[in-house]
Amino acid sequence: MYTGNYLKTQYKLLSGFKKKLFHYILSKADKGIVSSELLKGNLTPFLNEDRIYWIPYFVENTLKDINEKDVVNIEGLNILFLSNLMEGKGIFDVLEALKILDDKKIVYKAKIIGGIDLEYRNKIFSYLNSNPNIEYSKPVRGQEKIDAYLASNVFILPTYYKMEGQPIALLEAMLTGHIIITTDHAGILDICTNKNGYIVNKKDPEQIAEKLVEIGNDLEGYTDMMIKNHHYVKSNYKPEDFINKLSEILKK
């Protein structure tokens, strides 16, 4: 059984026969696997802790040819948000932070990529259409996604999404040399800490803007972080590592 970060919450919302059936089925699993050690609590209502394992995600081989020389980008403040444009992913905190940069006359470019939550479509586009510093794109794949990563140097994901697990985009962003701005949420701290950028408060666009200004004022000073983030992910989050760990668990 492999799970993310909403299972325990969903279980608590159940009652009566449904809850008993839910517990009965999941407790029959021989083993449980989560994507982060911080997420083990999702399975503790059903399995003993010694039967719960964790394996972090990995970065796809499509990014394997990116090298250290590709990831140092200090030509201006270039911001990337690559995720679904949902309230819980922090999109409005990002957009408000960019408004603060505009008010402060900070020079930057921002690329926002992802599918738009229909509930907030009009509100999101009101931000996008009023800000000439923002370029929006629908979800991209392959070389387009690689190009988007390599064209930017700060990756923002201030998520508090209730079903968040461990965002693969954070690993991809670190591999491509980004300074990270994210939150202490779900399993994020297992892969990303203040050594990789900044952990900010949830729902705090002012703090996001503050960190962006700080980065923009000294991009060259973040060169070592860009390089270290690249090597950290390239060394520790390979597909073969995931497969080997999974194989080891299944043999136990």
Image (tube, helix red, strand yellow):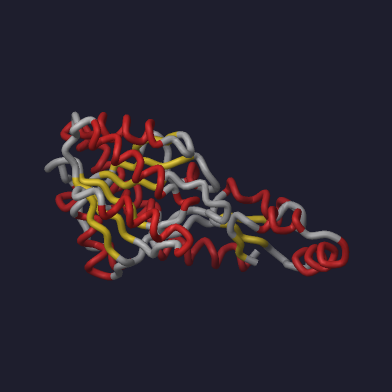
Residue 172, given in percent of the width and then of the height, sits at 34, 56
> Residue 231 placed where, x, y %?
29, 48
Q: In the image, is residue 178 above or below residue 146? A: above
Tell me residue 104's x, y (percent).
23, 30
Quarter of the view holding residue 240? bottom left
Residue found at x 47% / y 47% = 159
**Is 119 drawn above or below residue 228 in the view shown?**
below
The residue shown at (47%, 34%) is 201
Q: Nearer the viewer, residue 205 or 11?
A: 205
Task: Looking at this view, name the residue that lies furthest to the left.
Answer: 75
The reply, left or right, for residue 36 in relation to residue 32 is: left
Q: Is residue 71 left or right of residue 35?
A: left
Image quarter of the N terminus: bottom right
Q: Within the image, what quadrant is residue 250 found in? A: bottom right
Q: Is residue 230 left or right of residue 42?
A: left
Q: In terms of image quadrants, where is residue 108? A: top left
Residue at image point 21% right, 34% down:
216
Q: Is residue 207 above or below residue 44?
A: above
Q: Return the residue nearer the eye: 138 or 73.
A: 138
Q: Residue at x 70, y 58 (%)?
A: 10
- Quadrant placement of the C terminus: bottom right
Residue occupying the far right of the picture: 16
Q: Residue 237 at x, y = what percent?
A: 40, 56
Q: How many marks?
A: 0
User: In the depicted view, which residue is nearer to us: 180 or 56?
Assistant: 180
